Amino acid sequence: MVDKITEIAIFLDEEKTKEVTDFNLDLGILEAGKTTEIPLYIENKTRFTLNTKFDLINEELTAGDLELKEDVTVLIKNDTKKMIISVTPKITTMKPISAKLNIKLDYVVI
């Protein structure tokens, strides 16, 4: 697995002031049955179009609790797109939950 991806930057805010510097996302303490949506802003820092594949990994939540509601599959050069993570746990968490973001990139060569 790659420890650092330099082709893209991931931000927690649209103004691009809060960058995610690793692949771990803090989802916070979650309430059972309540949907929490977390926006991420994905910036392509290259001069190329990128095909992207994002997966979320979390062993504390059950299947279906955590999903990419709005996924980013293509990033045009120097563009930023919004991705939304949706979390609806079946039980209330007693401690903050995190998810690991797995990213795969392919350059589009025309």
Image (cartoon, rainbow, N blue to C red):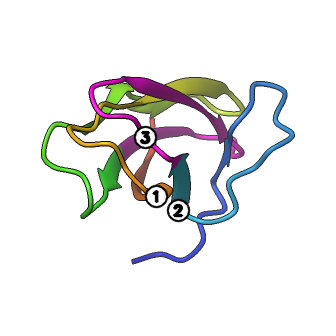
Q: Are marks 2 and 3 in contact (CB under 8 Å)?
A: no
Q: Residues within 10 Å of mark 1 (few under 14, many from 20)?
A: some
Q: Nearer the viewer, mark 1 or mark 3?
A: 3
Left or right: where does residue 18 sit relative to residue 46?
A: right
Mark sitting on residue 30: 3
Between 93 and 19, the one lying in front of the other is 93
Instruction: Tell me if 93 is positioned left or right of 4 in this view.
Output: left
Question: Which quarter of the rendered picture does the C terminus lie within?
Answer: top left
Q: Which residues are magenta?
A: 28-53
Amino acid type shown at disc 1: Ser
Q: Amino acid at mark 2?
A: Asn
| Residue drawn at x 57%, y 24% as measured from the top left | 82
Above or below residue 44? Residue 59 is: below
- Which of discs 1 and 2 lies nearer the camera? The answer is 1
Asked whether the residues under the numbered discs 1 and 2 touch, taking CB atoms below 8 Å apart as contact, a structural biologist would say: yes
Place of residue 95 in the rendered image (x, y in percent of width and height, measured from the top left): 47, 59
Q: Secondary structure at mark 1?
A: strand
Q: Closer to the N terminus: mark 1 or mark 2?
A: 2
Instruction: Tell me residue 4's x, y (percent).
Output: 60, 71
Residue linked to disc 1? 98
Name which residue lies at 12% across and 45% down.
63
Q: Is residue 4 magenta?
A: no
